[in-house]
Amino acid sequence: MAKLKAPLLSLGASGAIGKSLVFFPWKGIDAVREYVIPTNPKSTKQQAQRNLLTAALAEFHATGYDEDDMTAWALFASTFPTPRTGFNAMVRAHIMQALGDGTWWRMHDVFPDPLAGGGATVTCQTTETVPAMIGCRYGYSKTSMPNSVGAASIEDGLATWTIPDLTEGKEVYLFLSQQPVTYKGKTFYQGRTGVYHYTALAPA
């Protein structure tokens, strides 16, 4: 519907009339142009993009991340060169693995429990059932976690890892992940967490 500021075409109008004419101010001039119908407002590519986003949003809400999980996603988000939220980082991770033909495996309620000697027992809830399929990567930087250990067990949806002894007093960063897929030459995981951390304890 066009909104008139005075009689039509005398002072100004904005909006559309019958999807045939569009009125708008342009550089101080009251302009009018033909209404153009998009050639394909629901293309296959657009629909695919919407479906990817819908699936990622559904997974985010269904998982029910707790406060610690969201803090970890926020820390992961801070590793990117451009600002983003933890929510954005999780949604992106889900979409990118889907583009690589991955299947997302849920991991949440992560708890790193520091052990004497610098290691830790890490647990999380997961939909994965095979311990060998999920790993824990860890290191001394939120952007570099070169070490990894496989899950020791999964019982009733609770997976457990044991990080070996590390240097006392160091901050240890970690994330959990399923198997990787590749999309446009980059690696993404079929399910992952944000980045958690703990301080390595002294030997007993």
Image (tube, rainbow, N blue to C red):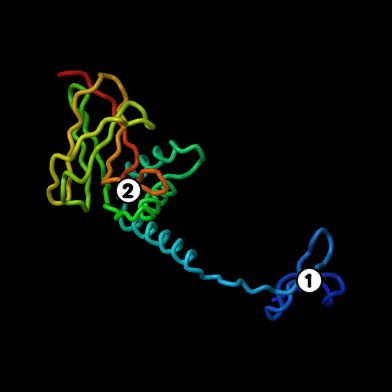
**In x, y percent, where is residue 39?**
60, 72
Would you name the residue on which mark 1 appears? 32
Q: Image check: 59 left or right of 202?
A: right
Q: How many marks?
A: 2
Q: Residues within 10 Å of mark 1 (few under 14, many from 20)?
A: some
| Horizontal and vertical percent position of residue 101 | 33, 56
Q: Which mark is residue 181?
A: 2
State which quarter of the image contains the N terminus.
Answer: bottom right
Front residue of 202 and 193:
193
In the image, residue 70 sits, relative to residue 2, either above or below, namely above
Residue 31 appears left or right of 140: right
Query: In the picture, which quadrant includes the C terminus?
Result: top left
> Where is residue 51, by image quadrant?
bottom left
Image location of residue 59, percent across then percent down: 34, 57
In percent of the image, x 70 and y 74: which residue is there? 35
Question: In the current view of this chain or complex, which residue is farthest to the front?
Answer: 185
